[in-house]
Image (spheres, grey):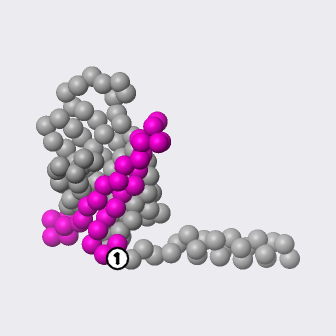
Amino acid sequence: MLTRIFIVASFAACLASCQSLPADEKRLVGMWRFEDSNTIVEMRLGSDHTFQSEMRHKNELTTPGSFPYRGQWRYQGTQLTIDSAMAYIPTDRRTRTGAIDTARDVLLVKSFDGTRTLTYRRLR
């Protein structure tokens, strides 16, 4: 009897975790990369709405050598919103906004200070 309850509970948990994302959100899930002459930023938008990002400077010796950000993302209408914090300074919360350009398969995200729009290209 306990075995049957466990199997049913496991199956229900699997179904709940396998919920399908809306099509517009599925296009956002994956690895993205921005690169300019000074900086490389790679970010992952997870299917569970988690966000991870790693920023590295190309021509500078910095300590630390990379700047990891962690957080959550959401997509409403045509607007992507990323709420994140630097991994080792969790009180330094930052919010960025962006949109996807499906014709070019790029993600357009505002810089933290809002002065530039960064073009991220899909890695996978």
Residue drawn at 36 percent across, 36 percent down: 67
Taking the view exactly as shown, the residue that stands out farthest to the right is: 1
Q: Pinpoint residue 43: horizontal percent, then vertical percent.
A: 33, 50
Amino acid type shown at disc 1: Ala
Residue drawn at 34 percent across, 72 percent down: 76
Q: Quadrant of residue 50?
A: bottom left
Give the magenta part as a residue range. Answer: 76-105
| Residue assigned mark 1 | 23
Residue 49 appears anywhere in the view: yes
- Identify the image quadrant of the C terminus: bottom left
Q: Pinpoint residue 79: horizontal percent, then vertical percent.
A: 29, 68
Above or below for 110 versus 87: below
Q: Main secondary structure of the magenta part?
A: strand
* Residue 103 falls inside the magenta stretch: yes
- Identify the image quadrant of the N terminus: bottom right
Q: Nearer the viewer, residue 69 or 22?
A: 69
Q: Nearer the viewer, residue 84 or 101?
A: 84
Residue drawn at 17 percent across, 49 percent down: 115
* Residue 37 falls inside the magenta stretch: no
Q: Residues within 10 Å of mark 1 (few under 14, many from 20)?
A: few
Q: Quadrant of residue 47?
A: bottom left
Q: What is the count of numbered marks?
A: 1
Q: Which secondary structure, mark 1?
A: helix
Residue drawn at 31 percent across, 55 percent down: 96
Above or below for 102 versus 124: below
Residue 51 appears anywhere in the view: no
| Left or right of 14 in this view: 95 | left
